[in-house]
Amino acid sequence: MYGNGRGIGQDYKEAVKWYRLAAEQGHLKAQSNLGVMYDNGRGIVQDYKEAVKWYRLAAEQGYWVAQYNLALSYAKGQGVIQDNVMAHMWLNIAASNGDASATKNRDIVAKNMTTAQIAEAQKLARECVAKNYKGC
């Protein structure tokens, strides 16, 4: 038990409730955090597709944490079809928006890609940034 007298599972459920309220109003950090809750099955049934939905909403608003998590979803094939090109693209974007670990992980993903795939991912990243992350 924690200080409020409730078990930690209840705290996660409460967090999901508040994240959802804020996320549905467009709050990008709440959207990203709700994605994490779905991704990890904290306070809610684990649902990778739902996690991707919330990550994408925040990623399209330029939030690098969500961009990074969306990239990992593509890299692992969780909630989306596994796609190294899309993983590389989102990691590249997250890196350019301030996530130092995205650069390292982008380079790891690149080891499993052809030169043409890397070029495609870089092209898609440039196009995505030019579109302000919408429809990427």
Image (cartoon, rainbow, N blue to C red):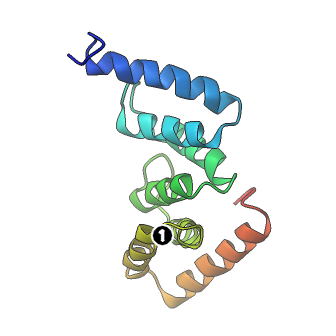
Residue 73 point in image, percent of width and height: 46, 54
Amino acid at pointer 1: Asn
Going 67% across and 80% down the picture, which residue do you hit?
A: 123
Going 66% across and 57% down the picture, which residue do you hit?
A: 62
What residue sits right under mark 1 in the picture? Answer: 84
Q: Residue furthest left?
A: 1
Q: Secondary structure at mark 1?
A: helix
Residue 57 point in image, percent of width and height: 65, 45
Looking at the image, residue 45 sits to the left or right of residue 17; the answer is left
62 lies above or below 109: above
Looking at the image, residue 96 sits to the left or right of residue 78; the answer is right
53 lies above or below 23: below
Q: Quadrant of residue 126?
A: bottom right
Q: Quadrant of the C terminus?
A: bottom right
Going 25% across and 15% down the picture, which residue do you hit?
A: 7
Q: Quadrant of residue 100?
A: bottom left
Q: Quadrant of the N terminus?
A: top left
Residue 80 point in image, percent of width and height: 51, 51
Q: Residue furthest bottom?
A: 115
Pick the residue in front: 94 or 117.
94
Count of labels in the image? 1
33 lies above or below 117: above
Q: Residue furthest right?
A: 131
Q: Residue furthest front?
A: 3
Instruction: Using a 10 Å C-alpha cutoff, classify the residue at mark 1 as few (fewer than 14 neighbours), some (14 to 19) or many (20 or more).
Output: many
19 lies above or below 132: above
Looking at the image, residue 90 sits to the left or right of residue 44; the answer is right
Residue 92 point in image, percent of width and height: 55, 73
